[in-house]
Amino acid sequence: MSHRTALAGGALLLVSALALSACSTGGGTSDTDAAACTPSEGKVNLTFTSWLPGIEDAVAIWNDENPDIQVEVQTGPNGNGGTYKNFFNQIEAGNAPDLGQIEYDALPNFRVQDGVVNLADCAGILDAKSNFIDWTWNQVTFGEENAVYAIPQDIGPEALYYRADLFEAAGLDVPTTWDEYAADAAIIREQGGYITNFSQSDINAFAGLVWQAGGQWFANDGESWDVTLDSAESTQVADYWQGLIDEDLVGTVAPWTDEWNAAYNSGEMWTWVSAVWGANTISSGAPDTSGKWAVAPMPQWTEGASAAGNWGGSTTAVLTGSKHPYEAAQFALWLNSDADALTAMNKSANIYPATVDGASLPAFADGLDFYGGQKIYEVFAEAAKNVNPDFTWGPTMTQTYTDVADGFSGAVSGSGTLLDALKTGQDKTIAALKAAAIPVKG
């Protein structure tokens, strides 16, 4: 699980080196496609590259129970740290691992570059659809019939982390709408704090806000891509946060830094709209605030609504070139649906499973002392049900994230706006798709 998810820099540059499908909902499958998914003869040894801490513990359970299908773990940096680039290089050289961890927003890039195997005809894979939360299955099929390009692993449904003690002392109710959130921001600023910190670099976090608002950044009709970073919903979200920035109602500290942790640890920042994995981020970064936090659903654009966004999450894919796609598919399905495997990964890496029953694991049943004894995972379980299932990632997310982040950095310092950054990102994304010979509208 990597919460700050992005495609590896340089992956786009390898497009010409691999066979391209026209788009994520068209074209052929990989060399080891669905029709080739039959059991191998004799003992099978698989390799699996992942950056999850302690993933070896879950794999050990499989190896003990399956002596004829052994899996060797190869650890690497998170996708953005170089693993994706390594995958593409290995695929081209013909020595890729059998399986790899790939985040949802990175998977379309592998699909258009024919880097993952269609597992649909591997025994039991299509039947597993009902085991997973609907929107995660859509993320790995791209709306194609008889297609499954990875097995969902974990998710990042979003909610509102807030300092319950500070809100109570200020006489403020927990905001349920974005209008209320903005009003609270002004009151909190008068008291010397900020309601939250706006990250200029976590563009995937901003995408989660657009996702919640019902917006899309990409769409595909089977023939070409449509890029809409400046959609009406995206514009609404951008203008909202631009207003808070202009009025100095949100902090703009660089995220994931000591300064950022200190701002939350000191009580300068009162809330954080973030994913389920953020529970551990806050508890580790702001230890002096233990017992003072609580979790509520995301504020809504429409009063009484219940929409949620998602930030982060990964899949397990079988990479092109695997000589044992059937066995690899069985392992990937087991890894991401077996209760013992999911429990082991939660214990070592705090993943929140993508399965329907994942929220019922004992690890998520108890209240957490850091959050005043609240059973916060109940909030995230409900949020996971309210994530729009139709959100689509594009095939060049690294470049898109980088281009938008450049503009966001300027916007928080008074140069341009968030909407300007989105429009620039759109133009550059379209240019990048055309340069890679990927059909695109506009």
Image (cartoon, grey):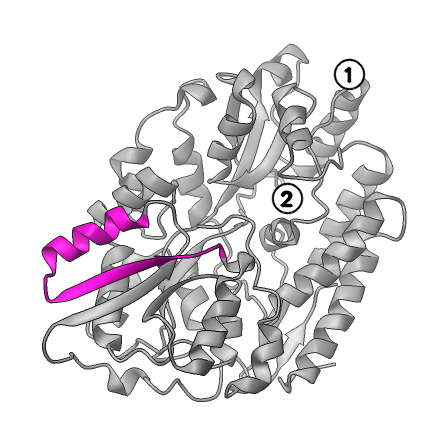
The structure residue drawn at horizontal position 53% and vertical position 46%, both measured from the top left corner, is 308
Task: Find residue 218 and report its horizontal and vertical position in percent.
Answer: 62, 69
Q: Which residues are magenta?
A: 55-78
Name the one closer to the observer, 119 or 2: 2
Task: Find residue 248 and report its horizontal and vertical position in percent.
Answer: 83, 32
Q: For the residue labelled by badge 1, is the local secondary structure a helix, a strand or a loop?
A: loop
Count of picture labels: 2
Name the one closer to the observer, 67 or 128: 67
Q: Which residue is mark 2?
A: 302
| Left or right of 53, for residue 72 | left
Determine whether 107 is above or below 260 in the image: below
Looking at the picture, which amino acid does disc 1 mark?
Answer: Gln
Q: Is residue 60 at least partly visible in the picture? A: yes
User: Does the magenta run of residues contain 68?
Assistant: yes
Name the one closer to the observer, 7 or 126: 7
Determine whether 79 is above or below 252 in the image: below
Looking at the picture, which amino acid does disc 2 mark?
Answer: Thr
| Left or right of 332, for residue 170 | right
Q: For the residue labelled by badge 2, is the local secondary structure a helix, a strand or a loop?
A: loop
Q: Which residue is mark 1?
A: 191
Determine whether 97 is above or below 422 in the image: below
Task: Find residue 229 and report its horizontal and vertical position in percent.
Answer: 71, 64
| Left or right of 191, for residue 16 | left
Direction top: furthest residue: 169
The structure residue drawn at horizontal position 28% and vertical position 47%, both measured from the top left corner, is 342
User: Does the magenta run of residues contain 259?
Assistant: no
Determine whether 331 is above or below 261 in the image: below
